[in-house]
Image (cartoon, helix red, strand yellow):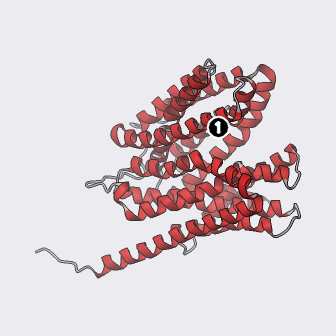
Amino acid sequence: MKTLFNNYLNTFKGLSKEVWWLALITLINRAGTMVIPFLSIYLTEDLNLSLEKVAWVMTCFGLGSVIGTWLGGKLTDTIGFYKVMVVSLFFTGILFIAVQFLKTFESFCLGIFLLMVVADTFRPAMFVAMSTYSKPKNKTRSVTLIRLAINLGFSAGPAVGGLIISGIGYSGLFWVDGLTCIAATLLLIKVLNPKKAIVQDEIKIENPESAYKNKSFIIFFFAMLVFAVIFFQYFSAMPLYYKDVHLLNTVEIGLLLGANGFFIFLFEMPLISWLEKTKYNKVSLVLFGAFLTGLSFIVLNITAWSGILIIGMFLMTVGEMIAFPFSNSYVMDLAKKGNQGEYMAMYIMSFSIASVFGFNAGLQIVSGIGFNSTWLVMTALAGICILLLFVLKLYMKKKINSNELKPSYNSH
């Protein structure tokens, strides 16, 4: 047991202190956004909005995320990641506190839209900062550490949020969310002074290649967009499937979904550390992660036995653990030839765009053709994702071969 624990700790070795600080700031920030899981309940109970209006609020939420991510990428390339992170975190805190005072449908739509625009400018800037402070060989593990912080934040946030609501109500939730963001800002200013921080990977780009013109990246972007739509079903349609088809209660559903975050916390870093040492490239590993995620849906149609839900969750979790870190790391490699903020923003936008229609589309399909047929649709989408990644592999191979065949000239 001691050897196993030491091996686990060794997987974290070699990461820069700045990456550790970024992980802590991300943990505080993500734990602080505890209002998000309770947003639909708050809107129906406290503001008495209909489900149709709640759907429009969530659409504004998703659109704000898309625009914020794009804007964050542009600003990061223009003024640098540090300024973007500080301004985004601070004003996100202010807006969280302010949103609680918006009581009409129209004002709340506008408020949540502005909140997400400001909040999600942080994400591309944070990933560029992480890339800058990581040695090239440690980038995938650095991504994994940040994901670990995000998962811990998302696990702790709702639990603490529930206690705050029962104790002092929803207003306390908005205040705590706002103050934690401001606290994360102060910590960022104190520990991550860019003038004193040690830059691990200085990237100087003479003629940056736009993400919009990079064929490899465009193929990859659409593959991840499809993957995100599939992945989001585990947080929209799947809980209803657990409740309505397998008759699980809320505690059982919570345990099953919570197992996902707990499993990631325990095993993602050792798994990524091991996979980095294998012969497989990053696109191949993302492809395998997409395959496992697709498989997690199709196994649900094999049997009515409720134990299959655990197998499905296990397959999805392992697929997620492989696909996300290596997809992020692959984009960071591509970004070395272009504007880093633009690349990271486009990567994150694939998930933001998927969130705008992915949640709604899954539920609409379930309503129209039922759960079992929906899982077949999701498996087919996983097949499209795999096909796109396979096309990307062929394109990369062709590009490498064409570069090798080009004649080289020596200048005298």
In the displayed structure, would residue 60 be above or below residue 369? above
Looking at the picture, tell me which residue is in the foreground, 245 or 342: 245
Q: Is residue 85 left or right of residue 96?
A: left
Label 1 Cα crowd, 10 Å radius (few <14 / some 14-19 / many 20+): some
Q: Position of residue 185 (x, y in %)?
A: 53, 29
Residue 395 visible, this angle? yes
Residue projecting furthest to the top: 101
Q: Position of residue 382 (x, y in %)?
A: 62, 65
Q: Which quadrant is the C terminus positioned in?
A: bottom left
In the displayed structure, would residue 337 be above or below residue 386? above
**Number of marks present in the image shown:** 1
Kindly identify the residue that appears in the image at 55 percent across and 22 percent down. Answer: 94
Looking at the picture, tell me which residue is in the foreground, 251 or 134: 251
Q: Name which quarter of the figure residue 36 lies in.
A: top right
Q: Position of residue 153 (x, y in %)?
A: 67, 40
Q: Position of residue 23 (x, y in %)?
A: 58, 43
Residue projecting furthest to the left: 412
Kindly identify the residue that appears in the image at 87 percent across and 62 percent down. Answer: 307
Residue 193 visible, this angle? no
Q: Is residue 117 left or right of residue 105?
A: left
Residue projecting furthest to the front: 368
Looking at the picture, tell me which residue is in the foreground, 88 or 228: 228
Q: Is residue 371 left or right of residue 217?
A: right
Inspect the image, locate mark 1, and give the three-letter code of the amino acid beneath it: Ala
Kindly identify the residue that appears in the image at 13 percent across and 74 percent down. Answer: 411
Looking at the picture, tell me which residue is in the foreground, 156 or 366: 366
Determine whether the residue tagged by mark 1 lies in a helix, strand or loop.
helix
Kindly identify the residue that appears in the image at 77 percent across and 36 percent down. Answer: 159
Label 1 sits on residue: 55
Q: Which quadrant is the N terminus positioned in?
A: bottom right
In the displayed structure, would residue 139 be above or below residue 198? below
